[in-house]
Image (spheres, helix red, strand yellow):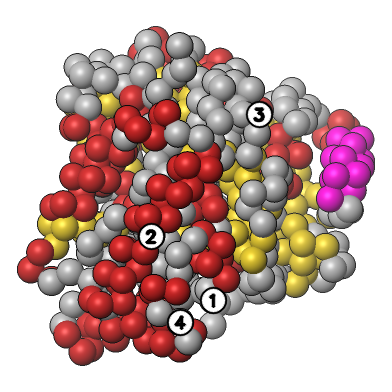
Amino acid sequence: MKRSFYLVPELNSMSQEEIRRYQESKLSKQLKYCYDNSELYKQKFDDAGVSPEDIRTLDDLRKLPIFMTKDEERKSAQASLEKYGHPFGLHLCAPVEDIYLTGTTSGTTGTPTFSYTFTEKDINFIGRQLGHRLSLAGVGKGDRVVFFFALGVYATTMTLWGLRWLRALPIDIDARAGTELLLKFMELTRPTYLACTPSLAELLIERSPKMLNKEVDEFKLRGLLTTGEIGIAIPEIKKKLESAYGCRAYDYWSPCGNFMGISCDSEKYYGLHALAPDVCTSYDDLIDPITKEPVDSDVDGAIGEMVHTSLERETCPAVKYAYGDVVQIFTRECPGCGFQGKRAKLIGRADDMLIVKGVNIYPVVIRDIVSTFVPDVTGQMRVVLDAPPPRVVPPLRLKIEHGKELGQADLPGLAQRLSAALHNEIKIRPEIEFVSPGALPKETRKTPLFEKKYEMK
């Protein structure tokens, strides 16, 4: 019997080509809606010399220039604040009084933006998709899910609607309250799932025995739901978390309320599965992060910056939004679960990319290589920058926590092995500074990859 991966029943019986035609039928309507209801999008189409009626296929969409970036969205928000007295941007397509829920980005790369703004119809549509996605991790009616992120006007808040749609009980705790309160609530509520960043899940492995005299596997969770940063895509982190908690760790992601990806129940990580092709075109539109030229996303293994276009959104639809996330796309059937649609593996942020001797390098790739040396290292590291990126004057400086069992005499040899591995994989020979285990602070939210020594202007 063929497994059902999609929430919309008819999608489960369609070929990938039929799903594409289905997406294209929704695309035309969405683009016309955006043109008719947003002064910004109307201007973008007019500047490009095209009308929404000209965009009939995904290939047509790929040829359009980028309409929005994070910086553009911030400018749009400032313009709407000055012109109309609201921060939702000139790309707002619905009346302000129809806004039902809003959530901001984290602000880690600049001023927070209200990318996650919905009408009631929007959140009901997206909430069902969010819930369906988590159901593939086993979440269902009666589950108690401790949800530990920054709450209030924040992106992850929309996931709570998905949990409620499943009739699961979200136990939402603001990450700014700290790990001690989180662990107390976990002790009191006996959850079946924990949703948090991979950094926090790692931190609790250390904190729980000290604060509760209890190992994390004693919570008997059925699953970890991680998002917000690259974590279990790194094999050593996936292995560490699943071994410590005694359950499967899942990776999920929904930038701008689009994309709707989740990893499958497999020992090996096979990427974020495109489970909601009726929500957006994100897996089908890539650009080169440097040249901004289109990249063919139908080629297995293609790498590029993901471009988001919503297919059913009233309030703040994304249209050709280059959000900055660089991914690798896989088009072949998933070896772990048999899913036949596209899958994506996050590689890094376009604005995190470094250029060393002409080589483009993402810090997450460095961390991935460093993590293969566990337990000689803890896996925690920072890229030390003396000047603003992307260009780095060699050598690239790394600060790495060595393992607990290593003495000072062991470090020169470890540095040579690390340097050789990094040169073999990404053609750099870094300058490595070792620090003791625990010296690099872990965060309850996103753990930074950079240590910036220069002054921000």
- Percent x, y for residue 149? 33, 43
State the CA–CA distance, disc 3 to disc 1. Answer: 36 Å
Q: Which residues are magenta?
A: 413-426
Which label's residue is closer to the chain start, 1 or 2? 2
Distance between the Cα atoms at labels 4 and 1?
A: 11 Å
Judging by the rendered image, the residue that carries numbered circle 1 is 65
Q: Residues within 10 Å of mark 4 (few under 14, many from 20)?
A: few
Which image quarter holds the C terminus?
bottom right
The residue mark sitting in front, 3 or 2, is 2
* Residue topped by disc 2: 27
Q: Earlier in the sequence, mark 3 or mark 2?
A: 2
| Residue under numbered circle 3 | 235
Instruction: Give, as a three-letter code, the residue at label 4.
Output: Val
The CA span between labels 3 and 2 is 37 Å
Residue at 37% across, 10% down: 220
Q: Earlier in the sequence, mark 4 or mark 1?
A: 4
Q: Earlier in the sequence, mark 3 or mark 1?
A: 1
- Where is 414 relative to 294, above or below? above
Task: For the residues labelled 3 and 2, say whether their Cβ atoms are less than 8 Å apart.
Answer: no
Q: Indicate the position of residue 448 as horizontal and vertical percent values.
A: 55, 52
- Lower position in the chain sequence, tag 4 or tag 3: 4
The tag earlier along the polypeptide, 2 or 4, is: 2
Q: CA distance from mark 1 to mark 2?
A: 16 Å
Under circle 1, the secondary element is loop
Secondary structure of residue under mark 3: helix
Q: Estimate the spatial distance between the alpha carbons at disc 4 and disc 3, rounded to whole Å.
A: 45 Å
The kind of residue tagged 3 is Pro
Taking the image as shown, residue 396 lies to the left or right of residue 8, namely right
At mark 2, the secondary structure is helix
